[in-house]
Amino acid sequence: MSDTLLYILIGLAALIVLFVLFRLFGSSSAEANSDTAAATPAADSAAPAKAAEPAPPPAAEPVPATVPPAPVSSGTGDELTQIKGLGPKAAKGLAAMGVTRFDQIAAWSAGDIEAAGAKLGGSFADRIARDRWVEQAGLLARGEIAAFEEKFGKLG
């Protein structure tokens, strides 16, 4: 039974890696957006004039395994271990996923949190939400040190 579970986990990990590689090196989403934007005005001009209807919610997209890295001008990134509950081991795992800045973590959706927790594995899977990494990273990314220290304690 445990061998089967191991094979399933290895298969899932391989699928996640393939998905990330496809998202990073596959077709550009900017090209897809420009095609959609170009087609939209033509569709609007052909439709009869009527009251504007609210746009339907966008179709659910697959959750990316990581947040795409933000451009880093200095080339170094942020000191992620300033986030309470995020130690050197987690910082190293995040760096391997291309996450090196507070603003990247601050922008995580629930799906991104789940994917990052799964990639980090072990006890980290629940730690992201429990220790409120996204909230902490948002305060640090905006430079709100006093608010951070009031909620989470002094920066070390």
Image (spheres, grey):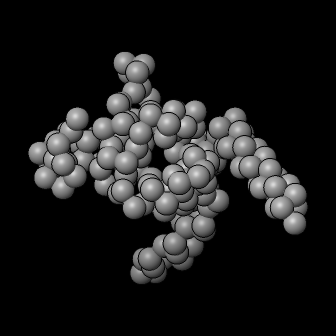
Q: Is residue 155 visible?
A: yes
Q: Is residue 104 above or below residue 44?
A: above
Looking at the rendering, which quadrant does residue 43 occupy?
A: bottom right
Q: Residue at x 41, y 39 (%)?
A: 87
- Would residue 133 appear left or right of 40 to someone viewing this image? left
Q: Is residue 6 above or below residue 93?
A: below
Residue 122 is situated, as x and y percent measured from the top left of the image, at 59, 52
Give the residue at the far front of this rendering. 2
Q: Number of callouts in the render?
A: 0
- The single residue placed furthest to the top in the displayed view is 74
Give me the residue at 48% from left, 76% from top: 49
The residue located at (51%, 52%) in the rendering is 124
| Residue 74 location, quadrant | top left
Locate the N terminus and report the quarter of the image it occupies: bottom right
Which quadrant, please, contains the C terminus? top left
In this rendering, position of residue 20 left or right of residue 130: right
Measuring from the top left, give residue 108's x and y in whole percent: 45, 53
Spot occupied by residue 76 in the image (x, y as percentages of width and height)? 40, 21
The answer to whether any part of residue 137 appears in the image is no
How far from the left and from the top, in percent, is residue 147? 14, 50
Query: From what the image shows, is residue 16 above or below residue 77?
Result: below
Reply above or below: 44 against 121. below
* Residue 12 left/right relative to 58: right
Q: Residue at x 72, y 43 (%)?
A: 17
